[in-house]
Image (cartoon, rainbow, N blue to C red):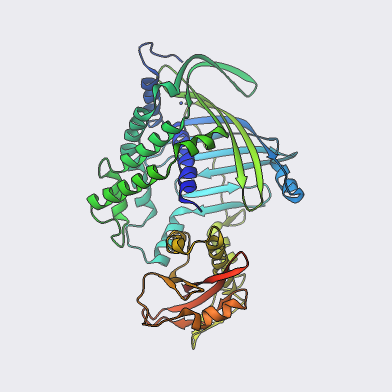
Amino acid sequence: MHKKNKYLKLSLILLIIALLLSTFSGCGKKEPDLTAKETLDKIFQQSATLQDYTVEFEGKMNMTMEGDIDPEAAAMIQMFQNIEYNGSLQMAKQQVLSHMGMNFNINMSGMSMAIEAYFDGEQIIVKYPLLPQYIVLNLSSAMDELTAYENLNETFTYENIIKDMDTLIVQWMPGYYSKMVDAIDETALELIDSHEFLIGGESIKSRAIKMTMTPDMMVDVIDVMMEQAIADETLYNILKKYDQYDDLGTFEEFKAEIQEGRSEMLAALDLDELQNSMNDMDYTYIMGYDKDFKPILMDMKISMVVEEDMLNIKSRVDTSGVLKYNYSKPTINFPEITPENSMDLMEQLGMLLFGMGDFDYSWDDDYYDFEDDNYSAFYYNYVYILEDFVWYLEDDYDFETVAEKIEEFIDYIYFDTAYVYFASNDGDMLIWPQTELPPGYDPRDFPFYQDALVMDYVSSDIYDDPTTMRKVQSFSQKVVVNGEVVGVLGIDFYVD
């Protein structure tokens, strides 16, 4: 994973999200004295105040493969050709958070599906055609379970998080919209006297504004997002409430960290490389608006080249969509949920993780005594993480970058991790977190290294960590580059 490519993909994704968010958060007649930037600013500011509306949408997506491709991969991807979709989204503003209802119809390779989704302020409800019951996720209960499991402080409640999200939308987003418009060059915008939108077999003409992406504009918009994060203490104060371990520090330290990340991002973004990436991407975003600058229609076309290294696939994805807004207060018909017609998502996830029987394990002389193989799901998740980590190190291996890769990969490990370490074939040892090793320590003399040379992977018995006295299990696997073992990677997981 190269840092430059990571920032490049992140920037593209963030820009598209920012543009779509400005439209869905709430995009005629144009006042003749307004410039394109002033018009866009008015539309964005109106978007931030929208409360009750319905959006009808329809569109198409097509994926075509380019170059030589494996027949099995081609057959798998064929189902994503000539997809058609339509549906509607209803948003009804409540005291803090909008209620939502959506139906989504999709026709994919001759197979039609109708999906329903609802949000009533506390739970997400989904009806998927291949399942006989509604899938229900109660966010408040899920947050309570997470808080108890992670031993988080009382600030971590669903109600607090929702209120803080509302504060961000009301106080933070309008400032971001204005600064984002300031960062857009006037030449990237075009006012259209009459644009024809086609939806539901109907032709609707409206004044509109068109936005065209350029590399400079994209970098400036992403830069503005980071700048807005430290423009005042709104975002910091919200994050600080949930900073259980005081990682953020003072506001000045928070600003310095954001500015450092901002500088690293700008230094990593090569505009020439960015332009080459955008040559493979065609993005058209046209918003129709009324006399009050409310969005009433949107026409979006995206075409991009997608490369999947693992499957050795290069494909072009073409997507088009049209949206139509209606500002009458919607009536959302929530389904009646009963134990008979629904399944709780958290319970289903628990069954997948812990097995079909009752989860019950106990300690006995540092070994698990478990029933129904409940621990096996965890065990193999540890193995999968180890294998992914080894693959990550083997890709473009360089011992000088191993420490950096370890720090990057730590962020992706969702299990409680005690130590991550790499022992090279020269006897050098890197360990996270940094730990002082005894003089003359040679990792090649230990079973985690020696056994990994002759096995696919090695796992230890469960033992007590002498520092924390918590239960730990160690896993290790050799790292092979061009047929040569360059070292062994180890991960110690807390398993209690």
The quarter holding residue 369 reads bottom right
Q: Can residue 51 be seen in this view?
A: no
Q: Where is residue 198 in the image (x, y as percent from the top left)?
A: 60, 21
Relative to 96, 356 lies left or right: right
Residue placed at 62% from the left, 19% from the top?
202
Q: Position of residue 351 (x, y in %)?
A: 58, 66
| Tally of numbered discs | 0
The quarter holding residue 382 reads bottom right
Relative to 375, 228 lies left or right: left
The quarter holding residue 391 reads bottom right
Residue placed at 61% from the left, 76% from the top?
373
Please name whichever residue, 335 or 110, is drawn nearer the observer in this view of the structure. Answer: 110
Q: Where is residue 400 in the image (x, y as percent from the top left)?
A: 44, 62
Q: Where is residue 18 in the image (x, y as percent from the top left)?
A: 44, 36
Residue 39 vertical position relative to residue 256 in the rendered view, above or below = above
Furthest residue in direction front, as rendered: 426
